[in-house]
Amino acid sequence: MPTPFDQLLKNLQAAQGDTAKLALVTFDFAVAGNPTLRAAAEMAAIPHWFDAKTLAALLPEQATQAENLVAQLAALPMIEPYHRAHGDPAWNVHEATRLALRDRLLANEPERFRQLSRRAAASYGSANPDAPDFALTCEHLYHQLAGQTDAGDVALDKVSGNWRADSRVERLQTLARLLEELLVSQPAPPLLPRGQGLSYMSIAAARENHQSTPATVALLKKAEVIFRELVASDPDNAARQRDLSVSYNGLGDLAVAQGQLDDAARAYADGLTIRKKLAASNPSNTQWQRDLSVSYVKLGSVAVAQRQFDVAARAYADGLTIHKKLAASDPGNSGRQRDLSISYERLGDVAVTQGQLDEAARAYGERLMIAKKLTAGDPSNTQWQRDLSISYERLGNVAVAQGQLKDAARAYGDGLKIRKKLTARDPGNTQWQRDLSISFFKISKLQAQQQQWPEALANAEASLKIDERLSQHDPSIATWQQDVKASRAWVEKLRQMGKGRKGSQGANPHE
């Protein structure tokens, strides 16, 4: 009669170079004859890392023995120490073994797999997008989704959306790596359909700078197919309708990155159609109203790129109307106030392109008033400070175009003061450094126009110094290379012209 050892040898021969099978054979051999340790190790393979608390949550019947079990597990050859950024020491099952054990459990006992995943989710806290240790949030989401809970889908939508809005690239990329693992699980991804669609979208969003690669497009197309099917099965489900609209926006964003503006406009328009219906069905739903405004902004931005400025102005005006209502309904909501200020800025930008300088000045003036209020309410908020500096810069641009050079000098000067403070606060922030360079450059141009040659040269050199530093910091960023080339040319021209000679204004290289 074959012994368990004979069966292990047979399995080893059958593995024949298959990494997953070899991992399972090695595991089975290591825990042979110890069913308690086997069960503990299989449970430890559910999460990416474990400690006594996690093991107790997964095996409540062995909770009092959790510390002892962790010590026994740590002695196994496939168990490794796991470095955590926060908290006590932990361990993890070697990657190949962990994935093989998870897939075996999913294939043989799917309901047990889901139950354990839900327990693991509870042991890793909650889906808090602002948690300092965001790895815990990602781990919680991973197990919520694997447990096929509606709460997991809702939490992923909330957290991923929050991180996308705040450009939390590192967090999105950490989450994406876990979601990718779920999507390649065998024999099939342990996700509800909505969670699978949201996972595809989250991974696409995590691609830095929203790279328009075929793989990213394929992810969004997969999400679109899933959401279309979900909408078709339940046309009155508003959450599913919104998911589909978000997938359209993602496809539109990629089309813009590829320069396919007509395709982008169609995708955004499809999203807009859905959002109009949702907003009309429940005018008091502020999220749907804001979604609608986002669609108008995206369509407006495409229209600007297509030089359809009248179309852009109408789209931006529709978005502004919504932002006015949202801001008025909650005056203390700084996010809504900022949204409103950005709407004014976009309208001002379009007015400038149309030569409507008075209208542009009025729009930028509204933007400035809001930025001042936000900054006064929270002087330590660097985003508000930067917004205020941009408002001054826009007003300065219009004043220059109107020939109101003294007004332009005041506006540029006010923006410069803010940008100097910001860069002093965080010299490593390259965006703030470039902002400061732009201020120096614009002031230099203005001073040259007024034949203030020494001052113009000094500010041009200050701009060039920053541009040279940025271009050396990362030579791959084309914009910085263009900046330094144009700044260097302007400085050289000023030096050649000398004091008292008439300057040539030329175009602003930073714009």
Image (spheres, rainbow, N blue to C red):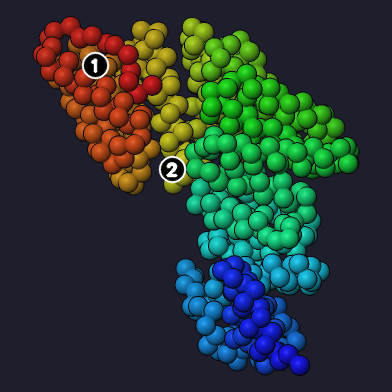
Classify the position of the C terminus by image quarter. Answer: top left
464 w.r.t. 287: above or below: above
Mark linked to residue 447: 1
**Percent position (x, y) of residue 212?**
54, 34
Q: Secondary structure at mark 1?
A: helix
Mark linked to residue 131: none
Q: Nearer the viewer, residue 389 or 3?
A: 3
6 w.r.t. 387: above or below: below
Q: Nearer the viewer, residue 403 or 143?
A: 143
| Left or right: 216, with 222 as reference point | left
Image quarter for residue 492? top left
User: Which residue is at a point 49% across and 74% down the rendered structure image?
Assistant: 82
Mark 2 surroundings within 10 Å by alpha-carbon count, few (fewer than 14), some (14 through 19), many (20 or more): some
Q: Nearer the viewer, residue 353 or 84?
A: 84
Separation of residues labelled 2 and 1 (CA atoms): 29 Å
User: Which residue is at a point 72% across and 57% down the rendered structure image?
Assistant: 189
| Left or right: 241, with 209 as reference point | right
Image quarter for residue 441? top left
User: Which residue is at a point 67% across and 54% down the rendered structure image?
Assistant: 183
Q: Secondary structure at mark 2?
A: helix
In terms of sequence position, does the residue under pointer 2 or pointer 1 come before the other?
A: 2
- Name the residue carrying label 2: 382
50 w.r.t. 167: above or below: below
**Percent position (x, y) of residue 133?**
53, 63
- What amino acid type is highlighted by mark number 2? Thr
Q: Nearer the viewer, residue 184 or 151?
A: 184
Mark 1 surroundings within 10 Å by alpha-carbon count, few (fewer than 14), some (14 through 19), many (20 or more): many
